[in-house]
Image (cartoon, rainbow, N blue to C red):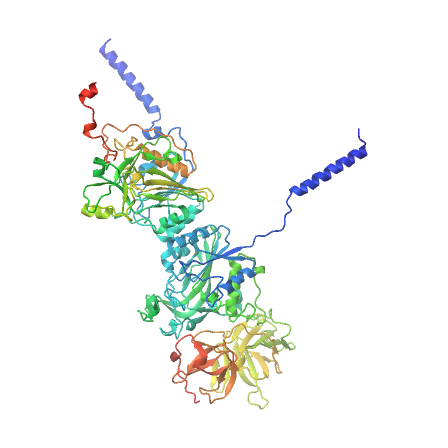
Amino acid sequence: MPSLFLLSRRVLAIALLLVGAGGLLVRPTSAQTTAPVVRFIVDNAIGSASPVDASRTGLSKFAERFRALGATVEFIALDRPIPDDTDVVVLARPTQTVTVPHAARLWAYLQNGGNLLLAVDPENFYVGYANVSPQILRSGLVSLLTLDYGLLIREGFIIEPGYTQETIVNQNFTYASTYAEIVSHPVTAPLRAYSLPVWVWGARPLVVEPFGVDSEATPLLYSNAGFAETNPNIFRRLRGTRFSPPTAPLEINIGVDLLGRMNVAGLAENTASGSRVAVLGDSELLMNGFGLNGTATNPRYPGNAIFADRLAAWLLELPEQQWPALPQGYTWMAIDGNPDEWPETAAVISDAPDLLVDPTHDILSIRALQDDRYVYFYVETGAPPPENTRVDLRSDTVGDGSASMILSAYGDGRLVLHGDTGETPLADGAVAVGRGIEFLIPRRVMPAQVADLCIYDPAIMDCAGQPIAPAQTGTRAPADLRVGEGLIVVVESSINVNLRQGPSTATQVLATIPDGTAFAALGRNSDASWIRVENATHSGWLHESLILANGDTMTLPEINEAP
Amino acid sequence: MPTKLIAFIASLTLTALLAISLNSPVVTQAEALLQEVPRLDGANIYFTEAGKEASRFDRSDAGISRFAGLLRMLGANLHTLEWRTGFPANADLIVIAGPVDDLQPDQIARLWAYVNNGGRLLLLADPVVNPVRALPANSGLFQLMWADMGLRARSDIAVVESDRIASPPADGTEEPQAGSAGALIVDFVTANINTSHPIASGGISEVAFFGARTLEFDASPQGYEVTPLIYTDSNFYGETAYAAYLEDGTFTFNIGQDTTRGELALAAAYDNPRANSRVVVIGDREFATNGRGLQTSPPNTASFLYPGNVRFLLNAVTWLLDSEPVDLSFPTPGPTATATITPSPTPTPTPEALPTEEEAGS
């Protein structure tokens, strides 16, 4: 009989052998996670935009958004069932008919819990190479999205002021700004906080019904254009190599056309299937040469870039903390009356508490900074100021050393510029009352120096008592324009262009403006060869050959300024 | 025995018999059919009605109340589908019984999602002849089914010429020429049944059709299986201009349009184990209606004139529901039974072929 020692060694050897064998049998597990799969519909029968298309009308940049979030991007046709492992399907710009079988396959996929992004353009809209004709209403998809998701795609083309049948023939002229809806949603939260527009190029309206059986829907973007033409025959049609003229006029038909504020983007979740759907009434807002023009770090339209990023993250069902950060180099400060986002680098003026002043109007500190377009102020008071608070910025505009009032910011949101010609409301500023009072004003109205800042209601006043020099942030304002109502013009030139004091090359050059800069168009000369423009930083005249207007410039009021 | 005593005993006997009968449970003919057979208890079967399908509530000749009644007696729960709210999660089977109006695009999409996610469908598709506009061959649901399932119904109607029945061509290849007169027979009985499939097995010897469209199928290996179940005999072809024939009484075999003569499929089953979906398509709505496929004699009894139709339908339902087949026997139709179908297009012997009395005697 073996000794105990030998026995124990044998037992140990056998045990080691078993463990080793077990180790061979047990497959080592690696922390493998399956990347989500995003499939774009690329189908000749539908004529949709492609994620591998790097041209102006391609979606390669949008596809890159998904890859940056860890997804793999592929494309499929809709002539076969959508693979079960698809996490997100993207169907953008169907130019040809979406048939019943196409819609049925999409629906089968959605009912299985998949997520869908659908971007459609107005019927018959000419997109540079074809009139789109998705006939989306006939496929059944519209009815189903309405019933099960509360998202109704309407027939129509949103008409911005200044659009004419001549201007809408060219997609380049049909750009317009849309804004984040009042209803808060993580996808559009930064857009709303920072008043960032999302640009569209010819949009169709949506109706979003928030509550339904098994569904919750949220409107995302809206247009204030006020009118959507529902007759698709307002567009010229490409037939072969020639265009046939439109067969219907562009005009408001009461009871037929859509009037009022309209949604152009919405999303919804179906609680029964667990699927998510986002619908956009314009596909250019995601396209390489349009909404996603520029680079990921230097987007031409930051609002579009942020919208695309966050929409992709939502569709992938990523937790919010994994959503992309806002692009760097911009001034990300929401005008909400609170100092939370103010950087340490802001200029600060402190003021001791004044016991004789109501705390709600007692200035404790003033912060000020400026970026390339706007000047930002935050006034901290002893107690949260009421909404009827008024803050005056004073400057020595006369040069006699006295401070004369130049601008008033009201707690109800108004900004009024006091000038030689009287009081002028500022449409492109912002005011908010929170724990303090916060406002921003465009740099074009800022004097070289702010002599003083005072806060008061009619009876009580407190002033800083010293000049205020806003600190330079070195960042850019994320939006060219804070409001997009009325005609907008964008500089279109390979070189910087001259902004002039009057409607003539004989007038003084006020500034040189780079390509892509947007302005609000305020007026024109007699033949619209010169356009009076204004944005946050500049105000002056541009020659019509150097700009692209989103409408007929002859619809602008004539301004008689002597050259 | 005194007369009064006899009468008294007789009355007692009758009374006793009456008491026994009153206390005994009444078993109807139908229940007697279905006793001791596998049941469909708990199965939820949804019938569609939005496209003017044959209704389970309709007891007229055009309804399918008998079919629905049989299912109910087997324990199934019957419902009417509400398209707008989508397919209920408890829908075990959808029955679309011969719509007249075509399915709307959103209905097709919902149905497709249901079927492709483990759904089961029994579809009766009538020929597209006025007023029926539903389920054309090349669009909508059948376009989808053809692409993804290899199964669809053609836009034709299975016919055989009356002349052909009377005197079939020697080589079986002669086609009707332009302006051919005579009658096209669309009501027929066929015994050409694929008994290798569970639906068509179990003693189904023949089934009756009353104007049926033929089915096209792709039985090649595809990851799913399509099995034709019932065929016409080889004399039939698929007429695509039947409406014109109804108007002027003439017909022509149009090469390239009409379906080539031969054994044409009239019913088929689709089975996709991976998706756990099954579909049965029958190319005739009247296959299941009270006054045609499920007609009885005497009227309103369980004596079905075409028990094969009943068995086939019930087998289709049990197969679709993964249940055991229902084994039924039916009472023989009554002596007053008058078939409403034209004679089966089986060639009848010519008078010369019948034996003479002398021959018979010898």
Name which residue lies at 78% across and 35% down.
A8
Q: Which corner quadrant of the image does residue B325 belong to?
A: top left
| Left or right relative to A240: residue A5 | right
* Placement of A71 over or under B343, stated as above or below: below
Residue A193, image x, y percentages: 53, 68
Q: Nearer the viewer, residue A484 or B328?
A: B328
Q: Residue furthest front?
A: B171
Residue A354, image x, y percentages: 63, 77
Q: Quadrant of the C terminus of chain B?
A: top left
* Placement of A190 over or under A533, stated as above or below: above
Q: Nearer the viewer, residue A264 or B209?
A: B209
Residue A199, image x, y percentages: 47, 69
Q: Quadrant of the N terminus of chain B?
A: top left
| Left or right relative to A332: residue B122 | left
Q: Residue furthest bottom?
A: A400
| Left or right relative to A387: residue B279 | left
Q: Which corner quadrant of the image does residue B297 belong to?
A: top left
Give the total of numbered labels. 0
Residue A153, image x, y percentages: 40, 61
* Placement of A250 over or under B210, stated as above or below: below
Q: Nearer the viewer, residue A224 or A237?
A: A237
Q: Is residue B291 visible?
A: no
Q: Is residue A342 visible?
A: yes
